[in-house]
Amino acid sequence: MVKQLDYHQITEIFTRFRAVDAEPKGELDHTNAYTLVVAVALSAQATDVGVNKATKELFKVADTPQKMLDLGIENLTEHIKTIGLFRQKAKNVMKTARILVDDYDGIVPSSRAALEGLPGVGRKTANVVLNMWWHVPTQAVDTHIMRFGNRSGVAVGKDVVAVERAIEDHIPAPFQQHAHHWMILHGRYTCKARKPLCSTCLIRDICAFEEKNLD
């Protein structure tokens, strides 16, 4: 396993990330907290591009829990049928809409525990919603962050919880709010799984990855 980078190295990495993109944004389209919850839940084992295509028309007619219930599961399924695991996701979206209407007056709760209690909403989804909507410095660890964190030495850990803790423990406070977005975007577009673009990477001189692709 790659050795965890030190405070000064990590500070330099995120200083460079911030210089290039001071306010990184998530790539899932949404209009409010509810549509963000739905979009993130739908994105499991799917691409953001694919989810955005499916939700473009969906959110025009169902941007609240009550409107989703009124739409019905058959119409919802038709909207999201191009997304992986769409049948199970449709069931979860409808169950979540019912819980939000019955238990929360149609309002998305702002606590991690309450969010994780919704069908199809795990820790990652809860962290994304808390970060993007309520600006809580939570860290939503996905496959891109797992890969980049462990390759580079920025956040080393054997599982999602360990990497999340490593981010919280090792990345300086001024970078915590946007840390997971910088890491996701870097993992998605530069530190790719098969052929990382090390030759053009802005942190290649600090990154601890020994098998750099410099072609």
Image: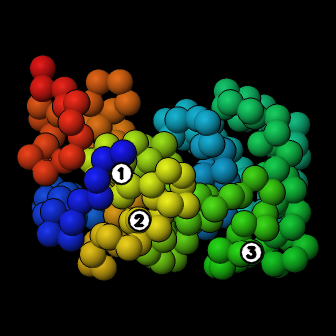
- Within 10 Å of the Cα at label 1, are there few (<14), some (14-19), or many (20+) other Cα atoms? many
Q: Secondary structure at mark 3?
A: helix
Q: What's the residue type where badge 3 is placed?
A: Ala
Task: State the image quarter where residue 135 is shown.
Answer: bottom left
Secondary structure at numbered mark 2: helix
Asked whether residue 123 is in view, the answer is yes
Q: Is residue 199 left or right of residue 153?
A: left
Q: Nearer the viewer, residue 93 or 213?
A: 213
Left or right of 168? Residue 13 is left
Place residue 168 in its image quadrant.
bottom left
Q: How far separated are the C-alphas under marks 2 and 1?
A: 9 Å
Q: CA distance from mark 3 to mark 2?
A: 24 Å
Q: Which residue is mark 2?
A: 166
When asked about the image quadrant of residue 33, the answer is bottom right
The alpha-carbon separation of the residues under discs 3 and 1 comes to: 28 Å
Q: Identify residue type, mark 2.
A: Ala
Query: Which quarter of the rendering shows the C terminus?
Result: top left
Residue marked by disc 1: 149
CB-based contact (under 8 Å), mark 2 and mark 1: yes
Name the mark nearer the viewer: 3 or 1: 1
Q: Which residue appears at 19% of the width and 26% of the height?
A: 213
Q: Residue at x 49, y 55 (%)?
A: 141
What label sits on residue 114 in the rendered view? Answer: 3
Whether residue 12 sits left or right of residue 4 in the image: it is left
Which amino acid does the dot numbered 1 rest on? Answer: Gly
- Residue 54 vertical position relative to residue 62 in the rendered view, above or below: above
In primary-sequence order, the first of circles 2 and 1 is: 1
